[in-house]
Image (cartoon, grey):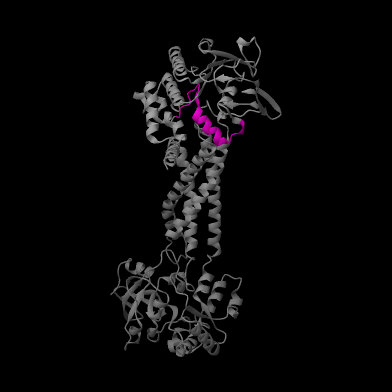
Amino acid sequence: MTNLFYNLRLVGKSLQRDRWFTIVMVLSQALSVSIFVTALVSAQRYSNVKGHLRGDVFRIEGDRKSVLSRFYRGTQFESFGEFTANYVSIQTVRALAATGLATGATVSFVSGMAGGPVERPPGRLPVRFVDADQFDLFNIDFRYGGPFTRADERASPPVPAVVLSDVLNQQLYGGADSVGRTMRIAGRDFRVVGVMRQRPGKINLWDFGVAPENVANLLVPFVFADELRPVPVMSWPPMLPDSGWRAIAASPSGITEYWVRLPTRDAQTRFAAALATIAPRMSLRSADEIAFRFSKPPAPYRVFVILTLVVLEVSVINLMRMLLAKATSRAAEIGIHRALGAGRNTIFGRQLVEGVIVSMAGSVLGLVLALPTVAMFDRLIPDSPVALAVTPAIVITVLLVCLLAGLVTGIYPAWRIAAVAPTRYLGKI
Amino acid sequence: MAKIGKVYRTGLIETAAIEDVSLDVARGDFVSLMGPSGSGKTTFLNIAGLLDTFDRGRYLLDGVDVAGLSDDQQSRLRNERIGFIFQSFNLIPDLDVYDNIEVPLRYRRMPATERRDRVEEVLVQMGLTARMRHLPSQLSGGQQQRVAIARALVGRPQLLLADEPTGNLDTIASRQVLDLLETINAERQTTIVMVTHDPALAARARRKLHVLDGRLIDPNAAGEPAALPRAANKPAAS
């Protein structure tokens, strides 16, 4: 231990003596790390979209080889074609609900409506119609207040309670506690009962399939769908609002996502059998499978991560060259240590530690620099649904990558300098 | 040392730095080596100090054949039995006097209290106590060489190798350093091998050898290269 401290002290003195060189090395590493962090943060929105979701949640899905999917494949609307498979008709939902096999279930569709805080003029408001089971199914955590409940829905008349997403609460109320405030939607007043907590930098599983701006949404009990006359965003073939909600809901055009909880294998089998009878072309898809499908970041983000890894690698090679140059400039000192009894291993270890310290210092500084870089990048992304966040997982990943990079960086210069005969440098100090 | 040879190779060119050098040095001896620049004095000293390898011959240091030792073993042997004094002092610029002197003991993994006692002892001996927290750059040439000698002595080596120890010093400082080396040799029975250009300094050693074109010449041995008389007492380096 004493020797470790002694070696660290010598490394510290060495770094301090060539302080400008050290600063340049650390800064060079820090800049590449900050870019790497930005790329990772951008891509990580697509990781762990499942969050705390339990494994017994399923979605009813259509045929992924449907006409629309095939029609749009290979075009810029490919994802739209894919998403159409996520929806079932409201008629099917009602038939499935009537079986009573699921212990929990929720519809989920977003409709652009007119509304907002009662004290302000109405604006465009993305409203997500859901059942109260939504909060339990997705284990939703609340920043303020709590969810509306089944009792609220079943009351006569139903309790006009709504829940805000974190992003919408930020937009409308600056992130303050808005529980108890009144929102007016299509002329009807609702009381805010809760604000959901957004996981930092993560997209929610239930938010995939809507336009990014709709992530800032208001959750309204589905029982109010008839009264508010929403037009589902996904309506195919399209129907005009004039048709009326009842007409839309009664037709195959009224479509929605439909999530169910099936806790036992038996329940899953029986539900699948009922589904095969009611809607033979539909199938059950587990939340795990869905999350896996979305866990891969889109290609531009993947390319971004790869490019920043290349930048990091170039930086590591550059750092390696600088460490070697630095060590060579101090070779006389190393020769003296060798003459006084330091073995090759001691010199190697000390040089390696120096490389790791420089690399890790650059990494920590890079993480700090990444905060403004990420914020700036966030503003530059036009379709960013949730604010990018440097999460603990990112910090740990970056530090591990940089520790590895530091070891790789330090090994070559350390090996080179330790291998040189001390006589080559003695007398040059 | 017996028939030691060292060749430097640069591409296809081979230069023999020393050839067939045989030398027995007894414990407590004081040997001076003289010779023109490039004659092989420093190469000889580096081989003797295990800082450099040799291509031919055999070198026994206090009975240990150094050719078969690993780098770590050689480092340990160097640390425990050999002290170096260089012409350019070779102090570590970032470390103060105390820390410079302590370096060999650090590599010996000596306990802190023993380390401190040893360093304080040589500081007193060299009259450097008042300067113990000075950096080398804050010392005169003579003081720096005294620090270098203190560092060489702190490990209580059996063999002291001095490469032009007075080369960068004025006359007074040179004399002081030589006085010091003589005292160390006399009081501690430390074997000293000193390379010098100065005939006056060389004359103060008990044995005076010459190096010419990589060969040792003993003026007392009728001009025969590498034919040096064995000392009667126990060899420290042979």
| Residue A339 appears in view | no
Whole-percent x and y of residue A121?
Answer: 33, 74
- The mark tally for this picture is 0
Which residue is at the front of the view, A147 or B2?
Answer: B2
Residue A136 higher or lower than A4, as above or below: below
Q: Residue A52 appears in which quarter of the rendering?
A: bottom left
Q: Residue B19 appears in which quarter of the rendering?
A: top right
Q: On the rendered structure, is A320 left or right of A125?
A: right
Q: Which region is colored magenta?
A: B67-92
Q: On the rendered structure, is B112 left or right of A262?
A: left
Extreme residue in the right direction:
B12
Q: Which residue shows up at 71% across the image and 29% down it?
A: B12
Inspect the magenta stretch and tell me whether residue A255 lies in it: no
Whole-percent x and y of residue A382?
Answer: 47, 63
Which residue is at the front of the view, A134 or B140?
Answer: B140
Whole-percent x and y of residue B51?
Answer: 56, 29
Residue B156 higher or lower than A51, as above or below: above
Which residue is at the front of the view, A66 or B157?
Answer: B157
Inspect the magenta stretch and tell me whether residue B77 lies in it: yes
Q: On the rendered structure, is A138 left or right of B6?
A: left
Residue A110 higher or lower than B214, as above or below: below
| Residue A191 appears in view | yes
Which residue is at the front of the view, B147 or B216?
Answer: B216
Residue B5 higher or lower than A101, as above or below: above
Image quarter hosting the N terminus of chain A: top left
